[in-house]
Image (cartoon, rainbow, N blue to C red):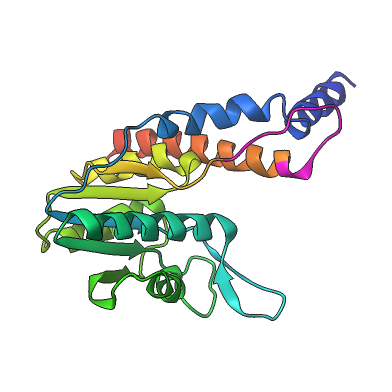
């Protein structure tokens, strides 16, 4: 009986936003406090994938968080072209969902329509995890000359992404594309449960990173 009451209380705290809000803050608040990025003579903007989905017509499209990341990367690129002679966008995202196209390939047309030049767009479409994002991007950048590196992803994803990129000796400037918000109240909300699940996934992922590093698996 006690376990049921505790479980119900936890469910309500998450669904009503009171526990979800601090969970979100623990993973994304730091990513929202970084200073604005500075463009070097040769700037590389790394965009991390956030999944794909089928729309009402059955067309494969980027998920909402991915669209925000795409928009942020395109905006950075436009600003970069005004300030620097060399700007490149690297899109990193394979096909972990088993859809008909990798994330990077699916996102490319949106970036092109946002006026990212084809010659400045590089696709990494093999990675299935954030760790592999960092691993494969590091391989690409070994052959690239750059003096400014930026990482575009959602605020909640940024701490874990930075851990993985630093593992491969990359120290990008973080640029958060969006943040999740918990709505506190009395009534439970599905969006709060989704946000709580995302925050817990990121926290578990960071714990996993340190455990794997301790065992030499990362």
- Left or right, 180 with respect to 216, comes to right
Residue 182, given in percent of the width and then of the height, sits at 67, 34
Camera-nearest residue between 209 and 111: 111
Considering every residue shown, the one lying at the far right of the view is 1
Q: Quadrant of residue 170?
A: top left
Give above or below for 213 relative to 42: above
The quarter in which the C terminus is drawn is top left
Closer-to-camera residue (35/126): 35
Q: Quadrant of residue 97?
A: bottom right
Q: Residue drawn at (41%, 34%), measured in percent from left and top?
A: 31
Task: Report x, y in % for residue 32.
Answer: 44, 33
Identify the magenta region.
180-191
Instruction: Report the predominant secondary structure element of the magenta stretch.
Output: loop
Query: Does 188 lie within the magenta span?
Result: yes
Residue 20 percent across, percent down from the top left:
66, 30
> What residue is drawn where x is 46% and y is 69%?
95
Q: Is residue 65 above or below residue 3?
A: below
Residue 8 sits inside the magenta stretch: no
Image quadrant holding the N terminus, namely: top right
Whether residue 161 sits left or right of residue 58 in the image: it is: left
Question: Horizontally, is 3 left or right of 205 in the view?
Answer: right
Q: Residue 187 at x, y = what percent?
A: 86, 32
Nearest the viewer among 111 and 79 is: 79
């Amino acid at each position: 009986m006690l376990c049921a009451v505790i479980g119900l209380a936890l469910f309500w705290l998450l669904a009503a936003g009171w526990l979800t809000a601090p969970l979100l803050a623990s993973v994304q608040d730091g990513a929202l406090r970084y200073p604005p990025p500075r463009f070097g003579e040769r700037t590389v903007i790394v965009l991390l994938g956030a999944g794909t989905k089928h729309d009402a017509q059955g067309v494969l499209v980027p998920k909402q968080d991915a669209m925000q990341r795409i928009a942020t990367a395109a905006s950075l690129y436009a600003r970069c072209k005004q300030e620097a002679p060399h700007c490149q966008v690297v899109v990193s995202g394979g096909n972990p969902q088993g859809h008909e196209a990798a994330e990077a390939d699916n996102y490319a047309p949106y970036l092109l329509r946002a006026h990212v030049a084809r010659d400045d767009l590089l696709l990494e479409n093999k990675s299935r995890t954030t760790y592999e994002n960092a691993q494969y991007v590091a391989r690409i950048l070994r052959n690239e000359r750059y003096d400014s590196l930026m990482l575009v992803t959602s605020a909640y994803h940024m701490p874990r992404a930075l851990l993985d990129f630093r593992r491969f000796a990359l120290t990008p400037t973080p640029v958060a594309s969006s943040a999740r918000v918990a709505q506190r109240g009395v009534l439970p909300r599905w969006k709060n449960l989704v946000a709580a699940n995302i925050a817990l996934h990121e926290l578990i992922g960071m714990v996993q990173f340190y455990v794997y590093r301790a065992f030499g698996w990362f």
